[in-house]
Amino acid sequence: MPRPLIVFKGKCIGKFLHMIGFKKDRIVRNLNQVYGSKENWPKNILSRIYRHFGLLLIEILKMPSVSQETVKEMTTFDGLEHLDKALSHNQGVIMVSGHTGNWECTMASLVGLGYDLHVVVKRLKHVDNDYIFGQLRESKGIKTIFKDKAVLNIRRALKKNAICLLVMDQNSKRSDGVFVDHFGKKASTFAAPYVLAKRFKCPVVPAFSYRSDDLVNHRAEFLPSVKFIECENPDEEVETNVRELIKPFEEFLLKHPEQWIWMHQRWRTQPK
């Protein structure tokens, strides 16, 4: 399927989802949480969110049939020197990111450049996980680490100076996260990236992807390693540094607001 046709079909899907109001109430709540009120929303943000989501759906469905070379051609990288600097310590790298842009395309492109990438995921319900992740990611050289055996496999990957990717943009269970301020409201946020980085003494590099203005190609942005803050109280130290890890995501979201999956219930879990 030619790329312009993919863009056309993606736009059509986005317009249809917008027309039927797919998850609109949740999107509106999240937008108001970030921007305060509808008057402060970016221009045409709802239609842009749905357009991106429609494009993303058709792109992901097509990913298994796209060649590695084509994926590489579609992606431009900014700040790769930050990732290379972090890897130069030979302790591996924990990469923190979110569901921004076309993350599948970006990950496949990174592997195409020769990087060893392992992605930590939760097993999906009612599907063959080996088949799904095998078709979507492992066919492109992306390795999967399932959450139920994550710590051991993350350690093994880091010993090989590989990259372990964890996402920071989803609501976490109380047992997995800490409550930190996120756009003015407490959000239960995964603590694992900081806890693992401290335990294994490896750098943490934030990275995000976003769609180019032509809607066909993609860009990936890598930031300098996060500088952690030491505190006397261990619990305070975890909360402080998890907050440091989500700051780059907040800054990215304000720059590219249509590039995130706003349907997610980010603030679902609240303090008792």
Image (cartoon, rainbow, N blue to C red):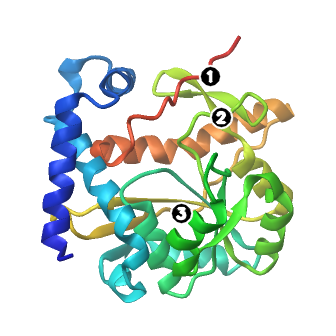
The disc placed on residue 172 is 2
**Mark 3 neighbour class, 10 Å CA radius: few under 14, some 14 to 19, many 20 or more:** some
Q: Residue at x 63, y 80 (%)?
A: 116
Question: Residue 125: percent from the left, percent from the top?
Answer: 64, 46
Q: Which residue is mark 1?
A: 269
Residue shown at 37% from the left, 43% from the top: 253
Query: Which label is found at residue 224?
Result: 3
**Residue 241, image x, y percentages:** 68, 41
Q: Amino acid at mark 1?
A: Thr
How many numbered marks does the figure carry? Answer: 3
> Secondary structure beneath disc 2?
loop
Q: Residue at x 33, y 67 (%)?
A: 219
The residue nearer to you, when weighing 270 against 20, is 20
- Say which label, 3 or 1, has the lower sequence index: 3
Label located before the other in sequence (2 or 3): 2
Horizontal side of 218 relative to 191 (left or right) equals: left
Asked which quadrant contains residue 130, the reply is bottom right
Residue 23, given in percent of the width and then of the height, sits at: 35, 29
Instruction: Please say whether residue 198 is visible from this viewpoint.
Output: no
Mark 2 is surrounded, within 10 Å at the Cα level, by few (under 14), some (14 to 19) or many (20 or more) other residues, namely: many
Mark 2 and 1 residues: CB-CB less than 8 Å, in contact? Answer: yes
Please name whichever residue, 89 or 161, is drawn nearer the observer in this view of the structure. Answer: 161
Instruction: Tell me the number on the disc at residue 114.
Output: none
